[in-house]
Image (cartoon, grey):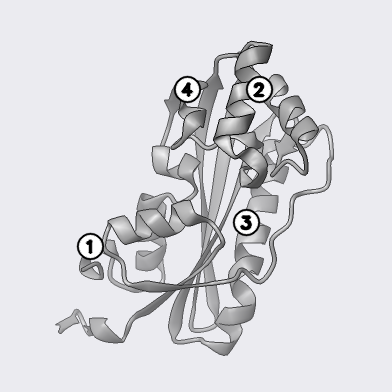
Amino acid sequence: MSLRGYIIPTMKFVLASRSPRRREYLEAIGLDFKVIEPGVDRTPDPVEDMTVVDAIRFAVDMARKKGEPYAKGHPNEMVISADTVVFGDGHIYGKPPDLRAARKALRRLYNRTHLVITALALHYKGKCFTGTDTTEVTFDSLTKEEEDIFIKKAEIKDKAGSYAIQGVGAILVRRIHGDFYNVVGIPLNLLDHLLREAGLPGLLHVIK
């Protein structure tokens, strides 16, 4: 099958990510892909007074680096990599190293609006196409007792900002403004645009 000169069956997608959420949502839309370990994955150094631009640059750099090592050896495959950061008050809230850090992050986010920034990178034929999406998330607050339950139930250790909106974290969310899938970590509309920017068919042409 071809589409405007593209031989669709030869298009091989690779997801460079440890995130089960990204994998689940790509599977849900019917994309055929394999999963590999990201080339690099780290929490930003704790720096206060960062700007939104700083946070975006960090996310883009991390997204690019996660897929870059594999992409260099497999130029004909479409390697998707991503990085999601939670940003507020000049600070990036990464994955908490321990429960104390998780509590501290949550308490700084209570009754406030923060930004969830996801950067996507699409590596193909030696080029890297990147883009970002930003969603505003407003939290309620928890009592000390509720916080104890939340931390136990939410499995926050591998979650940027110490929460996941598609899980128990949804209880904390008063409202969001923007793309829900961006908060999950895989803005599908953005991925569709990156494919087209790379001169490839959009997602609707490559899913099962």
The picture quadrant where one finds residue 98 is: top right
Q: CA distance from mark 1 to mark 4?
A: 33 Å
Could you tell me residue 114's position as x and y percent? 60, 27
Residue closest to the far top: 143
Q: Secondary structure at mark 1?
A: helix
Q: Residue at x 44, y 87 (%)?
A: 76
Q: Residue at x 67, y 37 (%)?
A: 52
Q: Secondary structure at mark 3?
A: helix
Q: Is residue 67 above or below residue 89?
A: below
- Tell me the crowding category of disc 4: few under 14, some 14 to 19, or many 20 or more residues within 10 angstroms, Cα based: some
Front label number (3 vs 2): 2
Kindly indicate whether the residue at mark 2 contacts the one at mark 1 (C-beta within 8 angstroms). Answer: no
The numbered mark, 4 or 2, whose residue comes first in the sequence reads 2
Q: Secondary structure at mark 2?
A: helix
Front label number (1 vs 4): 4
The picture quadrant where one finds residue 202 is: bottom left
The residue that label 4 is drawn on is 171
The numbered mark, 3 or 1, whose residue comes first in the sequence reads 3
Q: CA distance from mark 3 to mark 4?
A: 29 Å
The numbered mark, 1 or 2, whose residue comes first in the sequence reads 2
The residue that label 3 is drawn on is 60
Could you tell me residue 125's position as x and y percent? 49, 84
Q: Is residue 61 above or below residue 107?
A: below
The residue that label 2 is drawn on is 148
Q: Amino acid at mark 2?
A: Asp
Could you tell me residue 70's position as x and y percent? 59, 80
Q: Amino acid at mark 3?
A: Val
Q: CA distance from mark 1 to mark 2?
A: 43 Å
Front label number (4 vs 2): 2
Q: Which mark is residue 204?
A: 1
